[in-house]
């Protein structure tokens, strides 16, 4: 892993057990997150986005594979070490905003409490609230805030103290366009300030503003797009390659002949003549 | 923007629960119960101690000074030069009033007579002094003259101011006199039948004053020559009178046990000082006139205090298992309350874990949250305990005293309650920390079979209880745990059984109805709902059990009292029924009494001496006490058969014996007199069967017995005292359900001697620790009330949790056309299923405990055994709880369903 990577993972596997059997949420993810970039994880429901973000936020341990977050191997690090990471260096916005805020504290107190844990100055709390458009709601408790306001408050809490890693699970899901843009601006500003920001989203207006877009399907990264460059399909460490859906439609029999011609690799249907 | 506080989580914690009054009340109630449960036993024992003391003092109040009175009497038999060393320590004696001194001559005998003499005529008059007596007669305290009865003055032809002589007249081998002159200061009219002047007889406590009496004719009243103390001290030694001083001190009737204990110590120290050569009292006694004197201290306070300590100690022992049970229950309620709060804040706990809060921080935050409530719980718990003990504890008119010790206990209990909450929060935080629940592949989960473990532990503890001697079972910790384990095991089995039945049997309810909805919802059972159902089941089981235990102890005490005392009052009469024929020896001497003859006899096979009761079957059954439970009724049914003709004299055997009904054996009065008997039946206990020690008591018809035994034993015949064998004669005892005073009056009116030993059922209860058992039964009842409250609270929480569980689905169902009333009814059905299951479990558990080993009898050495006594009313109680909970669930469901905003519910994710 390069020294300046915030997150690095390889062959990351996450399996959930239940009485009805095992669910393989992640099937061998490999990626690195660098500071100063906003990465968006996209994919259909059940593709493993939330599981991946939970692991990246050091809130769960992988079932297999290697995951290093801010220099700590999440699989083997002590509970205390990971707790310290979450407390001081990782901002996290869960999928439901009601799970990201204390119900009995005022908005400004929520930020103040997190700021004191992260050793951040209280002087910038107004800016954090202003960044998400909640300056006039600082004295309100969550019960007095709407769902969208609670969502924005959760983002503001994650931004306090400019943590090294900000993980947000669909932070704009409950927001209108204006507020979604405002939240994205705030997250981009955090990335610009040096944080590694990783968010999940279905929203095209969000994915288009990402420095890097990862698409997950069936628990693996199917493609990766960096900036305005062409989309690249990802070959995992075992040599598996996921084709984009529009390409996949070209192979209805799900069989392909791989040919190497010079520096190129060609795929053709088996029934086609050579 | 308002400036945020630094560390707002910590600042907000102490008042956080004020924002959720429901949870605050639950925690406050649980903490109050916990503090109350810790304080109540000590308060109970302290109240038992003071009640036993006040009962003991009341029993001897206004009676003679001595073993049964708490008042103090100090006597010395000589005139001392300085009385202050005697009186000063007595004045300083704690809990006693000021000493009242009486002095009189006690030199009367067959040949020595105290007299007043004038004009050559002598008349009986004994010197007497009493503090305040002269003042009450209208004279000065230091009046140098004498006051005589008017009749005596008239007999001596004396007028006030005349000179006379007073002293002793000896008539042994001629008459000699030792007299001293004195002036007649006044005369008085004595109270009829008393030597006291009428003015003095009207004073309080005058009937207990020390008065002179003639040892040769105790019933004769000796006239008194009332003088001042200085005159008494001057004259008594010079006329060869035997001066006798008495200092009486009345005990404060409201004395506390601690004060009484101090008074006992001080009294003993005072008595010891009379034998300590270094004390002034010793010196004064040694120099007393006419001869060195001795000092006696007379009081029953030490024995009364000992008895009260013994009773309170017995109460402490008997109440301990229930006290521990109460503390455990209250502690569990407190823990459960905080667990429920934690469940209600599950998302917040995940947030705290995600934000990196340490479990220790969450523990301290919880402690801060509960601190105020735990502080409030201290006075509330003390008040609750005080109220509980006043209502269900030993009867007391002095109230339930709160000492500094109880306050300290309450404070410690409050701190322990806070610690319980903090520890619960800490464990909850650890459990919530997802990183501690590692989900890596290959790690196997440890699954503990809690249900099986519970059943196994219950069975093991059940066997362990059986191995404990029956006399010691009531006080072992195993006995405390056993009812918990049985109710928990039965609840677990019944709930699992109910779930199995529901899983294998589809509902017959019409689809779409509230009952159908309830049945559908009951299918996927939540662990939390099961846990709450189990709490209701265990609480109801324990409640039903406490009802039967309380009844069992109360009835057991009545049974044992009957076996010990026989009836309310028994009076031993030595000779009045002897040697006067059959009617006098057999039939009741007065109405509403019966005559019982007692003596020991030898019974095969080991010829051990056992008590024999010869009764009059015609009057015995109506006068005897047959207890409260019906255990003694078997003996009652046999009594009418005692006069029947069998293959020997019919007898009832009460107690532990190898002989069976129908057996024929012999009873031996001595080596010569032996009577063949036929055993009508063997019973555990019979009225009066435990009055005398012995493994078994023989009950026989006195009329038939007397016909078979020869004169030394037969009380109908007059016997020569010299012919009475070593076994002695039969002793007659009159039994009555009247009070001792009423019985004595009744017998006195019939010219029957009443100075024999009188025993009452109350004394039997006190002396054998049974009174403490009745108080313990009161504690059990209070505990039952707490358990019932716990069941109701758990049932209500169950309804609320079900409502929370269904918040989202209720919104959806309302949009599908269900009315709020239907949803509330569905929830009421569901709570009804759970509580009905709990009621079934409670009934089964109570039945198992009632039919199981006897564990509640703290006085098992006295038969019959006390055991839980169920009644149909217990079932009514349980059904009442079922109805109340279903109604509560319906009301709560209706209110909550209507109050919830659909949008808010859906936004919060349920």
Image (spheres, coloured by chain):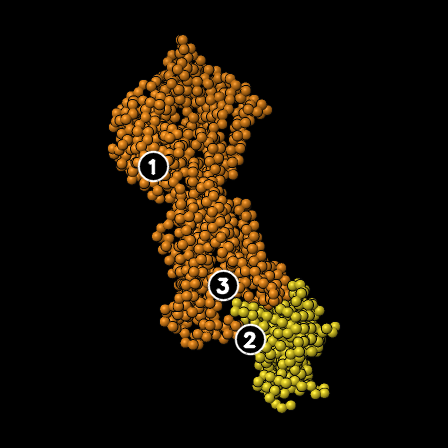
* Disc 3/disc 1 C-alpha distance (Å): 56 Å
Q: Secondary structure at mark 1?
A: loop
Mark nearest the camera among 3 and 1 is 1
Residue B449 location, x and y as percent?
51, 58
Which of the pair B22/B522 is nearer the observer? B522
Q: Which residue is mark 2?
A: A147
Q: Chain of mark 1?
A: B
Q: Residues within 10 Å of mark 1 (few under 14, many from 20)?
A: some
Q: Residue at x 69, y 73 (%)?
A: A8
Mark nearest the camera among 2 and 1 is 1
Which of the pair B491/B281 is nearer the observer? B491
* Disc 3/disc 2 C-alpha distance (Å): 30 Å
Residue A244 location, x and y as percent?
62, 84
Residue B527 - label: 3
Q: Residue at x 48, y 46 (%)?
A: B464
Determine the image quadrant of residue B501: bottom left
Q: Residue at x 28, y 26 (%)?
A: B708
> Which color is chain B depicted in?
orange
Which of the pair B668/B795 is nearer the observer? B668
Q: Which residue is mark 1?
A: B660
Residue B881 location, x and y as percent?
40, 58
* Disc 2/disc 1 C-alpha distance (Å): 85 Å
Which of the pair B213/B776 is nearer the observer? B776
Chain drawn yellow in the picture: A
Residue A217 location, x and y as percent?
60, 79
């Amino acid at each position: 892993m390069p020294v300046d990577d915030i997150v690095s993972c390889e062959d990351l596997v996450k399996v959930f057990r239940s009485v009805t059997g095992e669910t393989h949420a992640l099937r061998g993810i490999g990626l690195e997150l660098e500071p100063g970039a906003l990465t968006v994880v996209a994919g259909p429901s059940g593709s493993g986005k939330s599981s991946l973000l939970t692991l990246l936020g050091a809130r769960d341990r992988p079932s297999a594979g290697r995951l290093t977050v801010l220099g700590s191997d999440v699989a083997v690090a002590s509970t205390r070490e990971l707790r310290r990471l979450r407390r001081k260096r990782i901002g996290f916005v869960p999928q439901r905003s009601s799970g990201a805020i204390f119900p009995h504290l005022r908005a400004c107190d929520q930020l103040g409490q997190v700021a004191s844990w992260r050793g951040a100055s209280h002087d910038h709390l107004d800016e954090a609230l202003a960044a998400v458009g909640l300056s006039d709601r600082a004295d309100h408790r969550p019960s007095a805030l709407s769902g969208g306001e609670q969502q924005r408050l959760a983002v503001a809490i994650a931004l306090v103290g400019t943590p090294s890693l900000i993980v947000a699970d669909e932070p704009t899901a409950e927001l209108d366009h204006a507020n979604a843009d405002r939240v994205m601006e705030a997250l981009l500003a955090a990335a610009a300030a040096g944080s590694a920001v990783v968010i999940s989203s279905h929203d095209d207006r969000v994915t288009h503003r990402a420095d890097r877009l990862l698409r997950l399907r069936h628990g693996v990264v199917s493609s990766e797009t960096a900036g305005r460059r062409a989309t690249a399909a990802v070959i995992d460490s075992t040599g598996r390659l996921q084709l984009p859906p529009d390409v996949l439609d070209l192979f209805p029999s799900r069989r392909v002949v791989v040919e190497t011609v010079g520096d190129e690799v060609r795929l053709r249907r088996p029934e086609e003549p050579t | 923007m308002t400036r945020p506080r630094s560390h707002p989580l910590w600042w907000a914690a102490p008042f956080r629960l004020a924002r959720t009054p429901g949870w605050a009340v639950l925690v406050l109630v649980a903490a109050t119960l916990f503090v109350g449960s810790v304080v109540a036993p000590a308060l109970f024992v302290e109240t038992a101690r003071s009640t036993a003391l006040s009962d003991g003092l009341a029993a001897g109040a206004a009676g003679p000074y001595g073993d049964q009175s708490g008042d103090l009497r100090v006597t010395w038999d000589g005139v001392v030069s300085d009385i202050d060393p005697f009186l000063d320590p007595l004045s300083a004696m704690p809990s006693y009033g000021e000493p009242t001194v009486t002095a009189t001559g006690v030199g009367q005998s067959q040949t020595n007579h105290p007299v007043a003499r004038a004009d050559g005529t002598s008349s009986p008059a004994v010197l007497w002094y009493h503090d305040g007596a002269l003042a009450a007669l209208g004279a000065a305290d230091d009046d140098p003259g004498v006051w005589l009865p008017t009749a005596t003055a008239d007999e001596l032809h004396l007028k006030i101011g005349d000179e006379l002589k007073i002293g002793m007249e000896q008539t042994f081998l001629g008459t000699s006199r030792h007299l001293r002159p004195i002036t007649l200061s006044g005369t008085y009219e004595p109270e009829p039948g008393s030597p006291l002047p009428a003015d003095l007889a009207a004073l309080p406590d005058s009937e207990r004053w020390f008065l002179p009496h003639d040892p040769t004719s105790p019933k004769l009243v000796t006239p008194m020559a009332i003088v001042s103390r200085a005159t008494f001290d001057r004259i008594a030694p010079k006329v060869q009178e035997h001066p006798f001083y008495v200092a009486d001190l009345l005990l404060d009737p409201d004395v506390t046990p601690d004060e009484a204990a101090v008074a006992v110590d001080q009294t003993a120290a005072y008595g010891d000082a009379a034998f300590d050569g270094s004390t002034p009292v010793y010196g004064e006694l040694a120099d007393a006139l006419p001869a060195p004197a001795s000092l006696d201290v007379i009081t029953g306070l030490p024995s009364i205090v000992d008895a009260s300590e013994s009773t309170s100690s017995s109460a402490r022992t008997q109440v301990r298992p229930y006290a521990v049970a109460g503390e455990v229950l209250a502690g569990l309620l407190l823990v459960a309350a905080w667990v429920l709060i934690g469940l209600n804040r599950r998302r917040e706990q995940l947030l705290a874990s995600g934000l990196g809060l340490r479990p220790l921080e969450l523990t301290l935050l919880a402690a801060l949250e509960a601190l105020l409530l735990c502080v409030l719980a201290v006075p509330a718990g003390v008040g609750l305990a005080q109220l509980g003990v006043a209502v269900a504890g030993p009867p007391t008119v002095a109230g339930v005293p709160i000492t500094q010790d109880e306050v300290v206990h309450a404070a410690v209990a409050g701190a322990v309650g806070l610690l319980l909450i903090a520890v619960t929060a800490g464990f909850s935080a650890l459990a919530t920390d997802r990183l501690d629940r590692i989900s890596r592949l290959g790690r196997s989960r440890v699954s503990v079979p809690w249900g099986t473990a519970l059943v196994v532990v219950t069975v093991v503890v059940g066997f362990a209880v059986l191995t404990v001697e029956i006399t010691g079972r009531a006080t072992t910790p195993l006995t405390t745990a056993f009812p918990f384990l049985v109710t928990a095991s039965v609840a677990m089995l019944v709930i699992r059984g109910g779930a199995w039945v529901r899983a294998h049997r589809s509902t017959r309810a019409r689809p779409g109805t509230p009952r159908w909805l309830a049945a559908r919802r009951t299918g996927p059972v939540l662990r939390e709902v099961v846990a709450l159902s189990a709490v209701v089941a265990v609480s109801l089981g324990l409640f039903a059990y406490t009802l039967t235990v309380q009844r069992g102890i109360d009835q057991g005490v009545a049974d044992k009292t009957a076996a010990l005392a026989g009836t309310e009052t028994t009076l031993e009469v030595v000779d009045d029924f002897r040697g006067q024929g059959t009617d006098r020896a057999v039939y009741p001497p007065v109405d509403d009494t019966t005559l019982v003859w007692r003596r020991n006899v030898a019974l095969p096979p080991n010829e051990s001496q056992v008590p024999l009761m010869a009764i009059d079957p015609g009057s015995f059954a109506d006068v005897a006490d047959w207890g409260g439970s019906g255990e003694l009724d078997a003996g009652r049914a046999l009594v009418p058969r005692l006069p029947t003709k069998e293959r020997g004299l019919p007898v009832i055997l009460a107690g532990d014996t190898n002989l069976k009904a129908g057996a024929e054996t012999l009873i031996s009065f001595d080596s010569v007199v032996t009577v063949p008997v036929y055993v009508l039946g063997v019973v555990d206990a019979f009225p009066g069967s435990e009055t005398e020690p012995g493994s078994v008591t023989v009950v026989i018809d006195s009329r038939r017995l007397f016909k078979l035994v020869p004169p030394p034993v037969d009380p109908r015949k007059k016997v020569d005292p010299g012919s009475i064998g070593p076994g002695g004669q039969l002793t007659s005892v009159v039994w009555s359900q009247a009070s001792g005073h009423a019985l004595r009056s009744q017998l006195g009116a019939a010219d029957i001697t009443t100075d024999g030993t009188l025993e009452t059922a109350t004394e039997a209860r006190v002396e054998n620790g049974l009174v403490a058992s009745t108080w313990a039964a009161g504690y059990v009842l209070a505990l039952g009330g707490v358990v019932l409250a716990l069941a109701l609270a758990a049932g209500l929480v169950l309804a609320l949790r079900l409502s929370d569980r269904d918040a989202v689905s209720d919104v959806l169902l309302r949009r599908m056309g269900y009315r709020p009333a239907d949803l509330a009814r569905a929830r009421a059905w569901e709570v009804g299923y759970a509580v009905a299951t709990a009621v079934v479990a409670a009934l089964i558990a109570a039945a198992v405990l009632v039919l199981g080993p006897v564990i509640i009898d703290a006085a098992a050495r006295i038969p019959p055994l006390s055991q839980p006594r169920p009644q149909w009313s217990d079932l009514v109680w349980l059904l009442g709880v079922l109805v109340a909970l279903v109604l509560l669930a319906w009301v709560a469901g209706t209110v909550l369903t209507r109050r919830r905003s659909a949008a808010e519910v859906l936004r919060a994710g349920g």
